[in-house]
Amino acid sequence: MRVRSQLAAFGKAWRVGAHVLSGVAQIVVLFPRLSKEQCGRRVQNWARGMLKRLGIELEVVGAAARNESMLLVSNHISWLDIVALHAACYCRFVSKADVARWPLLGILATGGGTLYVKRDSRRDAMRVVHRMVDALKDGDVVAVFPEGTTGDGSSVLPFHSSLIQAAITAGAPVQAVALKIVDRRSGSPNRAASYMGDESLLASLWRTLRARELRVVVAFGALQYSEGRDRRAWADDLHREIAALREP
């Protein structure tokens, strides 16, 4: 049984690797000639294809608001969150600057419209807020993980509110999104795709490839505006909403 599981994982790894290369090829060859909307659709289709090759089922609860411009605010569990959110709703992520230098994955992230921030620099955080404001005013959907790091999925970590300021400055709405990775049959939390602390990306990916019956749940809340709240008060309200959305 263990040998069969290993072989199945290697088969998945082969298909995932080929899908990564196809994504890189699209970004390099096709994206320069496509419109922003066309690129977004291709990113979403690629993400759905990646979940299929990983053997992971996608469940979407509610729906992304049909709004030209908004900020998505989500909890953060794993690298898988980015694939799942792209599959449910194309958006531009805010990510740590190191991702841009990752082999192949950096090309995918940059091609997907990622905005990069140096997390240890307050000045750079202000710079990325200005870039987020520009993106929101330009009609983009931008997604952030205000926990600032990944958790184990058992609870929602405290939020850093600095990036919420972009929605206030741009006058854009925010939609809360709750993510869960669960066993497809029992619905109980599954940590196969966890990526936190000293865990390596490769180790997390290998556990995910070996896992069976995984489902990622993307639950959307209602669209909301600041209504006079400052970024800290709004971040607290979003934190409470995401925690509630994660409940069974």
Image (cartoon, rainbow, N blue to C red):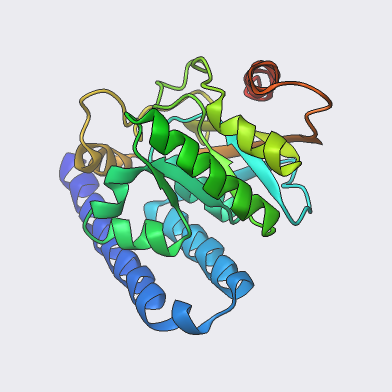
* Horizontal arrangement in the rendering, residue 168 relative to residue 33 (left or right): right
User: Does the image show residue 57?
Assistant: no
Residue 73 sits above or below residue 46 on the image: above
Q: Residue at x 35, y 77 (%)?
A: 28
Front position in the image: 188 or 72:
72
Residue 117 sits above or below residue 109 on the image: above
* Horizontal arrangement in the rendering, residue 228 relative to residue 238 (left or right): right
**Among the 4 quarters of the image, the one containing residue 72:** top right
Query: Seen from this angle, which residue lies furthest left?
Result: 3
Q: Residue at x 75, y 57 (%)?
A: 68
Which quadrant does the C terminus fall into?
Answer: top right
**Among the 4 quarters of the image, the one containing residue 5:** top left
Front position in the image: 49 or 97:
97
Residue 156 sits above or below residue 69 on the image: above
**Among the 4 quarters of the image, the one containing residue 34:** bottom right
Residue 233's spot in the image, x, y percent? 69, 16
Residue 115 sits above or below residue 78 on the image: below
Q: Residue at x 48, y 32 (%)?
A: 183
Which quadrant does the N terminus fall into?
Answer: top left
Residue 3's spot in the image, x, y percent? 15, 45
* Horizontal arrangement in the rendering, residue 180 relative to residue 177 (left or right): left
Q: Residue at x 62, y 46 (%)?
A: 133
User: Does the image show residue 218?
Assistant: yes
* Horizontal arrangement in the rendering, residue 92 relative to residue 202 (left or right): right
Query: Seen from this angle, which residue lies furthest right?
Result: 227
Residue 171's spot in the image, x, y percent? 76, 41
Residue 177's spot in the image, x, y percent? 64, 34
